[in-house]
Image (tube, helix red, strand yellow):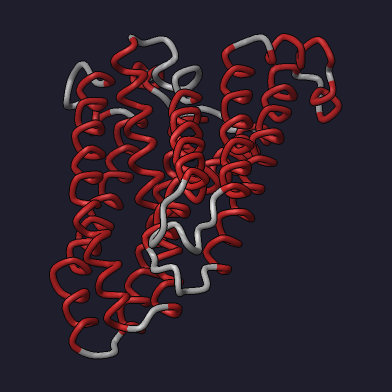
Amino acid sequence: MMEITIWDYGNIVSRWLIYIGISAAIGGPFIAALINSSVNKKSIISYIISSSVLGFIAVIINFFIQVGAFSETGLSGIFDPEMIGFLWQSPVGDSVLWRLLAFTVLGFALLLGNLNTIYITFNFKHAIFIFLYVAAIVSFAYSFTFVGHSASMGLLTKWLLGFHIFTMAWWMGALYPLWLSCKLLQPPALHKLMYLFGQIAMFMVGLLIVCGIALIFLFFANPLELFTTRYGQILLLKLIFVISILLIAAYHKYHLVEEVQQENISHKLQNSLKNEIVIALIILAITAVLSCVLGPASLTY
């Protein structure tokens, strides 16, 4: 049994917060831009900003946690200048740099782009917003190619993981703004938003599933390892939660969305989205465990 240290716990929690921040940074602006400009989106924008700031800080904290873990000199090890310099010049530092850059670029995008009007009008300022938003997404995805499971694998595996992270973050980061929309929008507008999101989500979730299946085949030489190794078993647990959230999403698309159009039952949709958010947070937590404590190397244990 592998011993989990206090550094591992700190790494897991900070990585979980990073994933939450990245999800909000990717999914939040997308939903805000889909909502009609007549709606006050202050609560959604506050969610994007606060979660992104949390993610930015978590990236920095996670770096120093790794410094302390590598230093092996106790709590004071997080300030070890030699280890800080070593990790900053390693792939770990590259990953941190690209994530901080992505959050910073997103901040500039939010300053330049007015998410309260982008749905109706489109001008040069909004074009800059979209460019910076896409640049931030690419930076986030690229940051995952330096560390984690794919670091020692080929280019295909790295970018498959990047697409997988992007689609997962887009979907899960959109859930809370959708939950807020149940309060902000009248039934006709809410139906329009949920219908449009459902159409886009079909493509995005398809990408998520394809990338996920491809990664499983790349990580596991034998399918039985899904059941016989710790990494495989934790991954199976994650897949169970993913299937659960997919079933809830299907229930939204093919049942609740139409009911919202017919009568004012947005509270029912809101409660269902709340359940989806809880499952999403669990999925991100399991992902943090897989990326920090376990990995393909544990398949041999």
Quarter of the view holding residue 256: bottom left
Residue at image point 61% right, 29% down: 101
Residue most extreme to the bottom: 263
In this view, the residue in front, 261 or 272, is 261
Quarter of the view holding residue 262: bottom left
Name the side, left or right, on which 184 lies relative to 59: left
Q: Position of residue 277 (x, y in %)?
A: 41, 62
As displayed, is residue 65 above or below residue 159? below
Label tally: 0
Q: Position of residue 107 (x, y in %)?
A: 62, 44
Q: Position of residue 176 (x, y in %)?
A: 45, 63
Residue at image point 18% right, 27% down: 224
In this view, the residue in front, 147 or 225, is 147
Residue most extreme to the left: 254
Residue at image point 38% right, 35% down: 165
**Quadrant placement of the C terminus:** top left
Quarter of the view holding residue 3: top right
As displayed, is residue 13 above or below residue 272? above
Q: Position of residue 281 (x, y in %)?
A: 45, 54
Residue at image point 41% right, 58% down: 121
Residue most extreme to the front: 123
Name the side, left or right, on which 165 lies relative to 110: left
As displayed, is residue 11 above or below residue 182? above
In this view, the residue in front, 262 or 253, is 262
Name the side, left or right, on which 257 lies relative to 28: left
Q: Is residue 257 visible?
A: yes
Q: Is residue 285 visible?
A: no
